[in-house]
Image: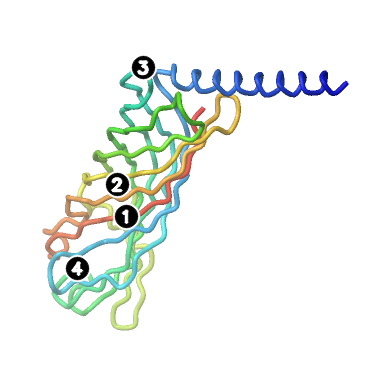
């Protein structure tokens, strides 16, 4: 009886190992991996000139589709991209003479709420998926943000102006550097979880200087990257 139990145990372990190996091969052999991400973040609008100061960062969210295009057979190199929605913003304090024309006569604080369509493009490097169930990854690249909504609550001289449309006063594209690192881990048949941290450093002025007279205002963010590949 003991021999039978031992034999069944060995067979169970072997079967589990074969299933795990098959799972790794399934993901390794996929040329394109598609998934979905929901990533909480902190966005920071960073003024570069005097007369404009950040008074608060803003909690935001990035969510949407993500895709990895494997560049070699082992899946250790991939082109990472996606199609996502970015919710961001910050609070900025403008001195008199700066900001939008309707409010620049006096100092004013702008609570900005910005929405972008984001397309990241990065080179992702991963540990050997044939060796471990958990893979480590790092990525370096860029991103393209296209604003679709911009609102601001403006407070000036004790008066609040709610939900001012600032989309026409925003630059039509934001581009920057993307850095990230994290892990991928098996969740079951044909599913793989992803977790990591990403940093984005914007290169382009978010506000149009001709409209705001504020020099350059860059947008940076730190995100807790969470997602699932199918």
User: How far, Cα to Cα, is label 1 from label 2?
Assistant: 16 Å
Tag shown at residue 99: 4
Which of pointers 1 and 4 indicates the residue nearer the eye?
1
Q: Nearer the viewer, residue 102 or 35?
A: 35
User: How far, Cα to Cα, is label 3 from label 1?
Assistant: 33 Å
Tag shown at residue 160: none
Per the image, the residue denoted by label 1 is 221
Badge 2 element:
strand
User: How far, Cα to Cα, is label 2 from label 3?
Assistant: 37 Å
* Disc 3 and disc 1 in contact, CB within 8 angstroms: no
Count of numbered labels shown in the rendering: 4
Q: Residues within 10 Å of mark 2 (few under 14, many from 20)?
A: many
Sequence-first disc among 2 and 4: 4
Q: Residues within 10 Å of mark 4 (few under 14, many from 20)?
A: many
Dividing the picture into quadrants, the one containing residue 162 is: bottom left
* Disc 2 and disc 4 in contact, CB within 8 angstroms: no
Sequence-first disc among 1 and 4: 4
User: How far, Cα to Cα, is label 2 from label 4?
Assistant: 19 Å
Badge 4 element:
loop
Sequence-first disc among 4 and 3: 3
Q: Residues within 10 Å of mark 3 (few under 14, many from 20)?
A: few
Tag shown at residue 147: 2
Badge 3 element:
loop
Sequence-first disc among 2 and 3: 3
Per the image, the residue denoted by label 3 is 73
User: How far, Cα to Cα, is label 4 from label 3?
Assistant: 53 Å
């Amino acid at each position: 009886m003991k021999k039978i139990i031992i034999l069944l145990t060995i067979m169970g372990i072997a079967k589990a190992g074969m299933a795990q190996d098959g799972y790794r091969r399934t993901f390794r052999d996929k040329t394109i991996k598609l998934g979905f991400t929901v990533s909480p973040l902190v966005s920071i609008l960073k003024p570069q000139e005097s007369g404009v100061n950040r008074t608060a960062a803003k909690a935001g969210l990035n969510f949407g589709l993500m895709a990895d295009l494997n560049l070699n057979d082992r899946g250790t190199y991939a082109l990472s991209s996606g199609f996502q929605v970015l919710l961001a913003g910050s609070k900025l304090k403008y001195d008199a003479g700066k900001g939008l024309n309707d409010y620049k006569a006096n100092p004013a604080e702008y609570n900005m709420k910005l929405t972008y369509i984001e397309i990241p493009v990065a080179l992702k490097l991963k540990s050997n998926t044939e060796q471990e169930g958990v893979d480590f990854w790092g990525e370096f690249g860029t991103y393209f943000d296209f604003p679709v909504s911009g609102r601001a609550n403006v407070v000036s001289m004790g008066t609040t102006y709610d939900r001012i449309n600032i989309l026409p006063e925003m630059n039509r594209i934001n581009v920057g550097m993307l850095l990230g690192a994290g892990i991928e881990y098996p969740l079951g048949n044909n599913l793989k979880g992803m977790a990591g941290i990403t940093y984005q450093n914007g290169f382009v002025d978010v506000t149009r200087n001709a409209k705001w007279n504020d020099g350059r205002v860059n947008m940076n963010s730190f995100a807790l990257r969470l997602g699932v590949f199918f």
